Image (cartoon, coloured by chain):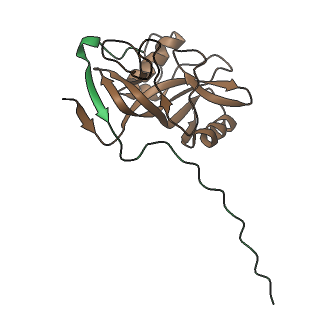
Chain colours: A brown, B green
Amino acid sequence: MNELHTEPIVAWRLWHVRRHEDEYRLESFTWHHVSWPAQRRFEAWCSTHGGAAPVQGHECGIYAFRTRQLAEDLLRRYTGVRQHYGRGYHELPPLRQGCPLALGRVSLWGRIVARENGFRAQYAYPYELFLIGGDDGLARDLRRLYAVDVSPS
Amino acid sequence: MDIGAPETEREIEVAPLEEPVPVPAPAEQPAEEPIPA
């Protein structure tokens, strides 16, 4: 029997922040041009299993890590910085100019497949964002659009 | 994203009492100014 929870799981992930027409949106970190909708849930979709994603034994679903540290490790791999960077894990590698990212917590619910480092989920919505490489104006725009807390870095 | 080895997978069902999607606050209506009689 599956575990049953009545509270969403809150996990960590990364997003690109890219301009879509006249506004910036969160975009999948690993799938280009898949933007996250504002003020409605993001639903997993699989080219093989359709709306049944995530399916056990496959790789479909919305991904998130169990800890901030694991999400930051991915950021370090993405930016090519292999060694430990800065004081503690709050200090992150520099980014390419004009390519802001968001690190943040995300609510997950529906069917969820759990592994040792994270989750693949059916539904998700951002919970709290830390903007990396963006200014106060971009933080304000994302806060208004997604209606969640956004802290500029 | 590397979330671990597939052989460790287990399935969880999360049915929240309320969906964690924020609803925008309703626009405030301007209060009518009292007009002195």
At x 24%, y 16%, the residue is: B8
Q: Is residue B8 above or below residue A151?
A: above
At x 22%, y 29%, the residue is: A2
Q: Point out the image quarter for the N terminus of chain B.
A: top left
Q: Point out the image quarter for the C terminus of chain B.
A: bottom right
The image position of residue A135, as x and y in percent, is: 66, 33
Left or right of A123, for residue A94: right
The image position of residue A48, as x and y in percent, is: 43, 11
Q: Quadrant of residue A4?
A: top left
**Of residues B5 and A152, the one drawn nearer to the viewer in this rendering:** B5
At x 43%, y 31%, the residue is: A123
The image position of residue A66, as x and y in percent, is: 35, 27
Number of numbered discs overlaid on the protein picture: 0
The residue lying furthest to the left in this view is: A1
Left or right of B15, for residue A107: right
**Of residues A79 and A28, the one drawn nearer to the viewer in this rendering:** A28
The residue lying furthest to the bottom in this view is: B37
Q: Quadrant of residue A124?
A: top left
Q: Is residue B13 above or below residue B19?
A: above
The image position of residue B34, as x and y in percent, is: 76, 81
